[in-house]
Image (cartoon, rainbow, N blue to C red):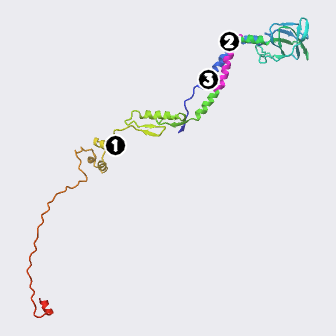
Amino acid sequence: MSMESVKKNPWPLRILIASMVCFVIGSVLILGQTSMIGDALDPARNNVVSIDAGSEAESPAFTIDEAGCHRAYGVDFEGNVTLIELDGSNEKGLVKESKCKLDWGAMSADGSVEYTILGSWELAEGDYRLRWECEGTCTNETVWLTSIDRMESELLSSPYAIIGGIVCCLGILLLPLSGVLLAFAQNRKQGVMMVVGPDGKLMPLTDLTPDVVQNQINAMNEGTREEVGFDIRTGEYMKPESNMNAQQQDGAQDVQAGNMLTTEQVYALMRGDVESASPQEQEAQVADPFPTPPIQRTEVPSRVDVKPKAQPERKIPVAKNEDWQSWDED
């Protein structure tokens, strides 16, 4: 086993490149619509009424033609601004403030002016009047009443601005995704265990499944003479029926063909007798190293009757005197 890096996954890098391309294209489309965006979001250009706060303490009456969210903006204004609803020439009462559409904010076209929210109201169609109270002097101060609904509709009326915003957001979303995939691929690259498969090649440990090993073993056994199979699941060899007889298994056929040396030839070769160790033409019949001597039949002679030889009779003389001397002389 060994720790080795696997093939690098190209998708994290591709996603990173795609995110950068989307971000660039979206930025170009949005920058091409800066003038339209400035006209829609700048209260000095898009407003219902613009009032000079330094001349009087309240504005003349004005009419709201489109109901919706309206907001008063100023630059350096310090004080309170109220909105009064009119019924003809009579004041009907103060309009209660409402925090409507806070996700939309005003901005200047060149970004040099920072606007301050002075008041926000949800208005219906009718006549109204603005009234303010300055904490100091209101010289050169301007108050703009802007329709947030109209600001929104003008901004979304440009298809290039919408496409540019979507593409730019897509690029921003793909950027962290590519970073996560790159980090994951780097960790996986450093922690992959490599093993040697049955075919002698390195392979990831995660790919070492019974099916893969079985396929490698089957591929290795293709084209062999005996075609011995091996089942990786049971651990048994699968050898087909062989027609090899006992003579082929003990090597007699190889000895006869001259492909294998006999014990006598190996012994002669060890003694340096090359001539005896070289394969010789075998005789038709090899003599038995342990011959049995032939049994010879012998004739048994017939029985001969032996007649006892007659011995002459010995006469013992009778002594006249019957003493021991006579017996001894006799």
**Residue at 88% across, 15% down:** 81
Quadrant of res 127? top right
Residue 224 belongs to the span the image colors magenta: no
Q: Which residue is mark 1?
A: 249
Q: Residue furthest top?
A: 88
- Bounds of the magenta segment: 157-178
**Residue at 47% across, 34% down:** 214
Image side of residue 318 versus residue 74, left or right: left
Q: Earlier in the sequence, mark 3 or mark 2?
A: 3
> Alpha-carbon neighbours of circle 3 within 10 Å: few (<14), some, or many (≥20)?
many
Asked if labels 3 and 1 touch by Cβ distance under 8 angstroms, the answer is: no
Give the x, y percent position of residue 12. Answer: 60, 26
Residue nearest the observer in this picture, 330 or 115: 330
Give the x, y percent position of residue 68. Answer: 80, 12
Q: Identify the secondary structure beneath mark 2.
A: helix
Image side of residue 128 versus residue 304, left or right: right
Q: Identify the secondary structure beneath mark 1.
A: helix
| Residue type, mark 2 in image | Tyr
Q: Earlier in the sequence, mark 1 or mark 3?
A: 3
Residue nearest the observer in this picture, 150 or 190: 150
Residue 167 belongs to the span the image colors magenta: yes
Q: Is residue 38 visible?
A: no
C-alpha distance separating marks 3 and 2: 24 Å
Give the x, y percent position of residue 156. Answer: 72, 12
Q: Which residue is mark 3?
A: 15
Image side of residue 306 versus residue 213, left or right: left
Work out which quarter of the rendered image holds the C terminus and state it: bottom left
Q: Identify the secondary structure beneath mark 3.
A: helix
Q: Is residue 24 visible?
A: yes
Q: Is residue 153 above or below residue 229?
A: above
Q: Which residue is mark 2?
A: 160
